[in-house]
Image (cartoon, rainbow, N blue to C red):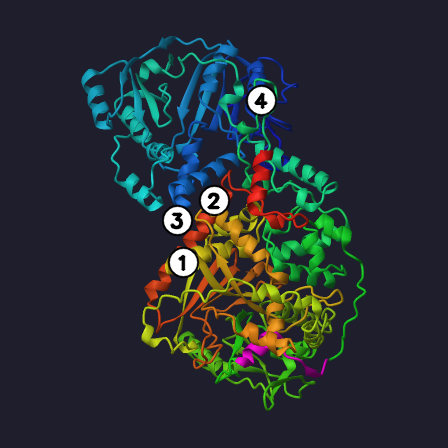
Amino acid sequence: PQTQKYYGTDISNVSLEYIKQQIEQEPDKYGHVSLAQKRAENMADIADNSFDVVLLSSIVQYFPSVEYLLQVIEESIRVVKPGGMIFLGDIRSLPLMNAFHSSVQLYQATPSLSRQQLKSKIDIKMEQEKELLVSPELFVALKEKHPEINHVQIRLQRGTEHNELNKYRYSVLLHIEAQPGKVITPTVESGAALSVQEIETYLRDQEPESICFSGLVNGRVANDVELVEWLSQPESKQNVQQLRKFLESKETKSIDPERLYELSASLGYSLELCWSAEGSPELMDGVFVRRELAVEGMVLTPLTQKSVAASNWHHYGNNPLTSQLRKQLIPELRDYLESRLPEYMVPSGFMVLSQLPITPNGKVDRKALPALDMAGSVSTEYVAPQTEKQKILAEIWKEVLGIEQIGIHDHFFEVGGDSIISIQIVARAQKAGIQLTTKQLFQNQTIAKQAAVAAAFSNMQHKQGMVTGEVPLTPVQHWFFAQNLQQMHHFNQSLLLSVPPQLKPDLLLQVVEKILEHHDALRLRYRKTSNSWQQINSGKSESIPFQVVDLSKYSETEQSRLLEETATVQQASLNLSDGPIMRVVLFNLGSEVQGRLLIIIHHLAVDGVSWRILLEDLFEAYNQLSQGETIKLPEKTTAFQDWAVRLVEYGQSQKLHSELNYWLNQPWSGGVSLPIDYPERKANNTVGNAVNVTQTLSQEETTALLQEVLSAYNTQINDVLLTALVQTLGEWMGIQTVLIDLEGHGREELFADVDLSRTVGWFTSMFPVQLQLLSKDIGEALKSVKEQLRKIPERGIGYGILRYLSQDEEIRTQLAALPAAEVSFNYLGQLNNSQSQQVSWQGGWESAGASQSSEINRVHLLDINALIVEGQLQITWTYNSRTHNPLTIESLAEKYINALQNLIVHCQSPDAQGFTPSDFPTVDLTQEELDDIIAEIN
């Protein structure tokens, strides 16, 4: 309102439309305002010397480079009248870039993080900086380049709060051909270690017309700069917790800038507070000038009087385009090489350099090349899906991975994919009419490639009717019955869901009936013969194991108690011989309160992948009925019965028998027994005595684990999780070799005509793994564990088939005689609400009762289960409270998390990268030979 003419520009039409709406509401008030959508430097239609002020507020950080900033300033100088000025506000300070990222990473870091790990995190974040940061000295140097600028004011950002918006930012005023009434060059006094009180005393006693206190310590950033200095000391052994205590206890004579403004106002002074000419980023110079003199005067500060070179402009700012350019270039290079080279020859990482280091002879100086930054080479430029098949696959990836945006060149494992997720993607692709196998997915890890190899139809034919008759026991089912459990009917998996109160029981009954009919494993029955167990697929039952329990009249406390009591009874009510082996209970908690849906299934008929299939079908079937449609579930894949028959046949094959030497010739050592706190109680290892301890990674750490860590050494998530486990257990037990029973999903592609992507049942594979920690170096340890796991044939599924299904008694006896592990490990994949088609169906918080009988004897002393829930990795340690002290396991669990964090930080560091022999399957190399070759190349 106080201007004669206002001309506003913005590159975003959205911002301009908003302002236009405001103008249209009061056209008389804003008739002098005109707007245009254009880039900041585009001032060609503006006449010379036509504006008093050019205002560039909060946009400099979004400029692509220092050179572009200079271009904008040059155009601004042209259009500003003599005596006018250019204002640049909210500029991020380049000298404080390290301090800013250090402060953020220190705040987010776990207490046990080491100095080197913290520094690595900071270095990565600085390299990934996407905004432009500018040194204040650039604006001083502009006076040399543009004589029209005859005065520069650089001011710290104002604000009483200590946050990112004021601590690390400043504003600049460039005066064009200014004609001041007086130039004020103040006397300079050292402000080192001065307090506000001492400055106040000086001003009151001396009453100077002007005075500059140089080298004042800025209290807003002093600790952050101290942190940067501490991180630069390689000899420091402190961790984050010790560092925080050190910074809290350190007494520094510093001043909050706002205190100086308050002081100057109270004593009749005007204050120019500028970054210090002394160079250290935590220092500032404060110029106090009598208010009446400052009104018409040009106040000089030591920094603005400094002689600064007007050349090498890129030194005055960072390059925010580095990461973007890398994202554009890397996928093009990768695609080009993949089209011409075998997979093992395609580089696993790329680094973009501004220039190559050259020797005096004009050749590339290989020794001067920086270490390859694997963490920075993961991301690829987003390329949207083009074809219909690509669009369908992209939607499936987004749903299953819980990621908002997926490009057709994003690599499956680099965005968090794993073997369990691959099964889900295949199932959903088939449902959408795209025929893709897990093997094709693993061999073609981008949507672009998968769309190219996926077929529009399948040649596989699977039984679509109800399957009945005898079903051979699978290896894991043989294992179950071999335990000879006292309460084997009470060995379940269960899920308690919070569901909408308006859920209709009659529709849910129909859904349960359809699911029982569609998924044959849910109708399995078992008969005990003289020396074995027989498994039978029964037909349709007249009774549906579904009931409604009305708790709506009870208080919330009573509802929780009664729900748990009912659930406990239901958990123990399954019947292996006569059925059912599944129960569904709907709890009505009131017309305005979310109900609860309890689903109980005996473990013999379900596993982690099966639950994902069942929940999708449950949601979809209910939605179909609620919309007046008939239930139509996706077509069945290979029947559990057929899979079991094929496994028995495979158990006698020469191909499988060729794996026997691997299992028998491992250097099995019975290993060292786990340390026991209460050895006299060891026999009481029952479910009733089992206790859980859970530790969790942060979302940021989990994301890094899934999307950055795995690319450093071309690993999979189990490689990383098991390396940390071997490190933790090895340190606890004082050994280098750890024996573990490893569990897998068991749905391996053994047969070309078998598809298990939508088959429900217990497929889990269990097999012993003896892992040796060959080095204390984190990278070497990870590579070693990776190679040991890669040597396991067919991901271990053959062990169970040979041990339980081979008709050769000697083979079964030999494998049964192998040392028994006391520790089991199972990575269960990712479970996100985003995968659910019903956001209103989520996990309930009440107890679902005991899924297993308290009398059942546990096989292992320690069971470790890893699961990613809502973006966070949860590690649950199950132990026997009668053999181990809680503090022992809690300490182990914490050390394991620390080991994982160390691995994550290491793999994010620029020097973390390397190949292993399994990356080159067509060449017979040892790790030492491979390292020598790579060293010679480098």
Nearer to us in this view, 535 or 42? 535
**Looking at this rendering, what residue extends furthest in the left direction?**
205
Q: Position of residue 187 (x, y in %)?
A: 29, 12
Q: Are marks 2 and 3 in contact (CB under 8 Å)?
A: no
Q: Nearer the viewer, mark 3 or mark 4?
A: 4
**Looking at this rendering, what residue extends furthest in the bottom direction?**
530
Q: Kindly identify the amino acid type of the residue bearing the numbered disc 1.
A: Ile
Q: Kindly identify the amino acid type of the residue bearing the numbered disc 3.
A: Thr
Q: Is residue 638 rendered magenta in the image?
A: no
Q: Which residue is mark 3?
A: 110
Q: Which mark is residue 358?
A: 4
Q: Are marks 4 and 2 in contact (CB under 8 Å)?
A: no
Q: Which mark is residue 906?
A: 2
Q: Whole-Å distance between the Cαs marked 3 and 1?
A: 27 Å
Q: Quadrant of the C terminus?
A: top right
Please give the name of the residue rendered at 52% of the width and 82% of the height, measured from the top-left corner. 549
Q: Position of residue 567 (x, y in %)?
A: 48, 79
Q: Which mark is residue 735?
A: 1
Q: Whole-Å distance between the Cαs marked 4 and 1?
A: 48 Å
